[in-house]
Image: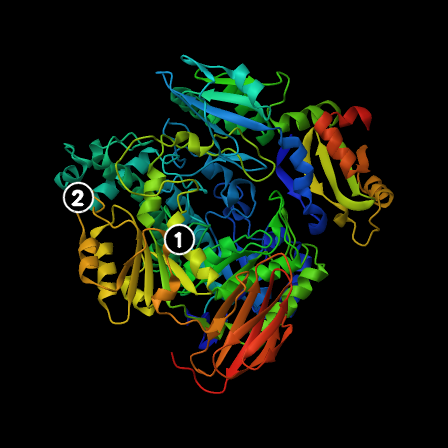
Amino acid sequence: MIDSGLIVEYIDPQIWANLKTIIEPFINRGRILHILSDKNGKFRGVTSDHCVFSLDGFTNGKSINTQKIFENCPDINEIREYTLSGLESYYRTVQGPEVYNMDIDDYLVYLYDIQENTDGIRIYKRDGHLKRCYMELIKSFVRDDIVNSIVFIWLTDKNDLFFNCILEFSKGKLKSISTHDRYTGAEKKFDVIYSLIVKEYKYPIISINMELDEFIRKVKENFRLKQRY
Amino acid sequence: MIRFTNNGIIIHGVEKPLYSGSIHYWRIQRKNWSRILDYIYDMGFEIIETYIPWSVHEYEEGKYDFGEIDCNKDLDAFLTLCEEKRLYVIVRPGPHINAEMTYFGYPEWILMDEEIQAKNPWGTTLVFPYVTKHFPIPSYASEKLYIKTEAYFMKLKPILKKHTGENGCIILIQADNETCNFFRDRPYIMDYSDASIKLYHQFLAEKYGAIETLNKVYHSTFKSFEEIEAPWGFKGKSVIDLPYYFDWVEYKEYQILYSLKKIVSIIQKMDLGIPIFHNCAYQEYTPISIQRNEQIEGLDVAGIDAYPEPGDTKMLRQRIRYLAGSSRLPYVPEFGSGSWFDRGIILTPEEEEFSYLYSFMNGLKAINFYMLVERDRWTGSPITSDGRIRIQYYDMFCRLMKMLKEHKIYQYDRKPKILILKNYDMGRFRALYSIMDPNILTSNCFINGPDIPQELLVPETDLKLNLYNGPGNYYYEEWIDKIALKLDYSHYEYNYSDMFLPAKEWDEYDVIIASTYDFMDRKTQEQLLNFSKKDRKKLVIGPYVPKLDRDFCKCDILKKGIEKNNNILVAQNAEDFDPSKLGISIEYICENPGIEISIHRKHTDPKEHLLYIANKTGETVNTKLYYKVPCSFFAIWRCEGYQHGNSLLINIPKYTVQIWKVKMEEVEHD
């Protein structure tokens, strides 16, 4: 999906300073508990925010009571349990020569796939349907609808422009990213920029024009923008 | 003749400040070059900087384009235009470039060559997860990489040579870029390729000379260096196992120095007759050491890059003071001006101004603003790639450059009397003390891999040593941070360095504060003791007194020295450290700890100095500074306040640096 020759130009710095706010709702999905176990049934835990997690009271002999952790720790959405041999196998596999044929987004999804299918690594999710990788969410959105298209995102914060981007997809690949800055001197209004995009590109345009709060709420609910807009 | 000085650079007999900015000619339409260079000149710059990427010019193996196919790639024409515009040029041919390029400026066919790839402990490659395409990290030990690099550099040679000398624009060349294993600092991530293991054995042979010497240190019975397997995680049981792991960490440093030496020697073959420098990425700890970089024959200066976040003072204070205490010329070869598109942070012009001036205040002498001109995958610069100006950034640079040049800021020196020596070996220990080091598969804000917190992989071996192994990355030392905080609170100025700073340079300071733990190499213990014995010098150590050397044999030189020497203070507890006992006078008294003060002097005029005042807080501050002798204050930069007797009453907005020129009626005496 992401072309290795991706062009990113005409990025308005003031608008782009808000990028993190836009990306965060896709990524931030609670804490992950990482557990290292050895063959003697010894465990240690650390959360994704680098805090040591005591497993006292969460073990049954040589296994972890993951259900109890989920019940007692509502902020933990996923538990990943590793053995050292499982980690070795995982890092050997995901860095093999064949991975360089993939696009970077496919590679990210592949990392999670292999992790779930490596002996010596076990993944437990609070919600079995939880997407593991935010790139999966974006790809599911892109893959179905977008072959040759322009995605034009325009977000306002109490009617003031907060963020915008123009994403150019060709043959299903993201080829370029820009903002309204590509149209020098144009009025910073959705309709104006939209009409300039129509003039410049031959592709159909999928536009998302909404208030920031609404965007974040919808992303958090479920990333199904394509069905609604 | 061109050479670095302590203040900047001498170009054909004239000393100039080294202030420059980056532009990528091949990423700009040639028709816009002239207008953009004019804008740069108008902002006050005399020097620009550019990469010369390998992948751009050797588009297929053995096929080159220097403008014959794509006119934007006409390097010769670009350099000729710079000469017409009377702009000097710093060139950075790599081979490592980054510059947010897919493959970091290396040609794809180089990276995909198995003889060039680095290896993880399990025999496969090292993935670098860049946002447009992941790629295999090359090995610094690969001979083939240097053969191919030399072939490319020799293609550049006639073009570059044409633009050096009395009438040429090229004044400096950079050897490689951020040579640091692609930011993989942890020792067991890489490099286990055959070439690297061979180099590891070479390192051991150079260090020990004979295998018997190594066996004595390792308590082992190896018959040859080649028999020794590289560790890929700490499996030691006691202190006697540590030298083997220390050596692997030292080898990682050696490999980087080896790589830089190779690139420097290739550049020397180009015979350009200009100084060579290097930029470290961000490290002031293993596997990097700028002092040792500067000991490489032919490499004149090593700087460290800086990309601060808004309002950052902690990182900048530490990094710039480390440069000021360690480098021949405190130089940031890449200081963020704008940002790469997937960083998630872009500073406003006001935030950038604060970070630049705060750095000058802390001892920065030379700077390259990266980037002055936007380009693919970069925004927030004063000039856009199509030749427009971003007025707020542009104005900020115009005003800043005017002030820096008008007041000859580069001729003033900050001379603190205190040097903090960080414990490089403690960083090495913290690096080696890991069960394993998985590669990092996350980068910036778009690429989110399933990484594992390093804390999960810290061993639980009881080595029965007093050392620091608390939270934080391995450059962090709690004792040092607490001591520095105490000094900051009382407005004492200091620099940072470590044991690689030649001891003769320690004499510039009246006080050395060194972090010490149970082990410290014999040479450093002796040097510290010798310093403490000198007239009017003081040594502060802590939190522990060393009793072992780096081979973990008994060595209590400092301990014995303390018994005989009153100039050594042991601050076991940093909280109890009292800076007033150091006997260092403070020139300005200010009761507000949120205000930072620095004094810069010009040796030609002892009756005058520059007073920098920084408000490091998010609130406007009204405060008073008292100076001990009669003087007059003159405003230079963002000065709001007035003089009342020997006091200066100031109003300083949040995250602002003020600069005053102070003229004393009499020369002060300490």
Q: CA distance from mark 2 to mark 1?
A: 31 Å
- The residue at the far bottom in this view is B665
The residue identified by callout 2 is B553
Residue A23 appears in the picture as rendered: yes
Task: Indicate the secondary structure of the residue bearing disc 1.
Answer: helix
Q: Residue at x 72, y 30 (%)?
A: A219
Residue A142's image quarter?
top right
Q: Residue at x 21, y 47 (%)?
A: B549
Q: Residue at x 61, y 71 (%)?
A: B650
The mark closer to the camera, 2 or 1, is 1
How crowded pointer 2 is (Cα within 10 Å; few <14, some 14-19, many 20+) is rated as some
The residue identified by callout 1 is B575
- Depth order, front residue of B164/B506: B506
- Depth order, front residue of B225/B321: B321
Q: Give the letter of the chain under mark 2.
A: B
The dot on residue B113 is: none
Q: Position of residue B612 (x, y in %)?
A: 53, 70
Q: Position of residue B266 (x, y in %)?
A: 37, 53
Q: Is residue B262 left or right of residue A47?
A: left
- The mark nearer the N terminus, 2 or 1, is 2
How crowded pointer 1 is (Cα within 10 Å; few <14, some 14-19, many 20+) is rated as few
